[in-house]
Amino acid sequence: METRTPSESRTIVTDLVLPSETNPLNNLFGGELLARMDRAASIAARRHSRRIVVTASVNHVAFNRAVPVGSVVTIEATVSRAFKSSMEIYLDVWIEDRESRSRSKANEAIYTFVAVDDTNRPVEVPCLVPESDLEKERFEAALRRKQLSLVLAGKMDPKDATELKALFIAD
């Protein structure tokens, strides 16, 4: 199976927050941000797999800072790990200061996508080879998150969750 790097999937979406997309406090609706992140993650997953992709789950979302009307918002999405047919996509959301143009991190999320064929059946995706320290950190953490998800869903026996056990049990 061929391999790809996270940088090959990197997707950057920059947009402006308009008044029609905000709540009564003039901050971006959470659902609007989720939709924007879903689109960016979808593109990253598609770039990695070069297949049709569907959202399997939203594993984590942290709304750490409000995103005010008029903000320039940048969403960076990158595949953090590829499994058999699924891919974990890590998203960072940034707000750009109007005057200084400095960026500050506002939110982050982790989505899971599955590559499918024309009949909506899962298909294998290329392996991911992380390069930077951050990519390696996210790559390793992705397996722990997947094992935790499988254990909680009753699809994996906790004793088989080797990466999770390694966090708590010393050899």
Image: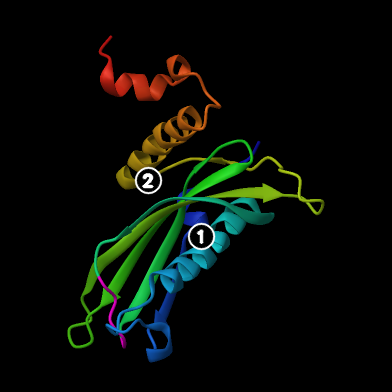
* Residue 19: mark in rendering: none
Q: Residue at x 50, y 69 (%)?
A: 35
Counting from the top left corner in percent of width and height, residue 49 is at 63, 50
Counting from the top left corner in percent of width and height, residue 56 is at 58, 49
Q: Is residue 101 left or right of residue 50?
A: left
How many neighbours does mark 1 have within 10 angstroms: few (below 14), some (14-19), or many (20 or more)? many
Main SS, magenta residues: loop
Q: Secondary structure at mark 1?
A: helix
Asked whether residue 4 is in view, the answer is no
Task: Report, in whole angstroms, how far the alpha carbon at label 2 lies from the one at label 1.
Answer: 16 Å
Q: Residue at x 24, y 68 (%)?
A: 65
- State which region is magenta: 66-70
Badge 2 vs badge 1, beta-carbon distance below 8 Å? no
Q: Secondary structure at mark 2?
A: helix
The C terminus - image quarter: top left
Q: Does the magenta run of residues contain 53?
A: no
The answer to which of marks 2 and 1 sits earlier in the sequence is 1
- In this view, the mark in front (2 or 1): 1
**Amino acid at dot 1:** Ala
Asked whether residue 87 is in view, the answer is yes
- The one nearer the camera, 115 or 129, is 115
Q: Residue furthest left?
A: 100
Q: Residue at x 59, y 58 (%)?
A: 47
Say which residue label 1 marks. Answer: 41
* Residue 135: mark in rendering: 2
Counting from the top left corner in percent of width and height, residue 145 is at 41, 36
**Amino acid at dot 2:** Glu
What count of labels does the image hold? Answer: 2
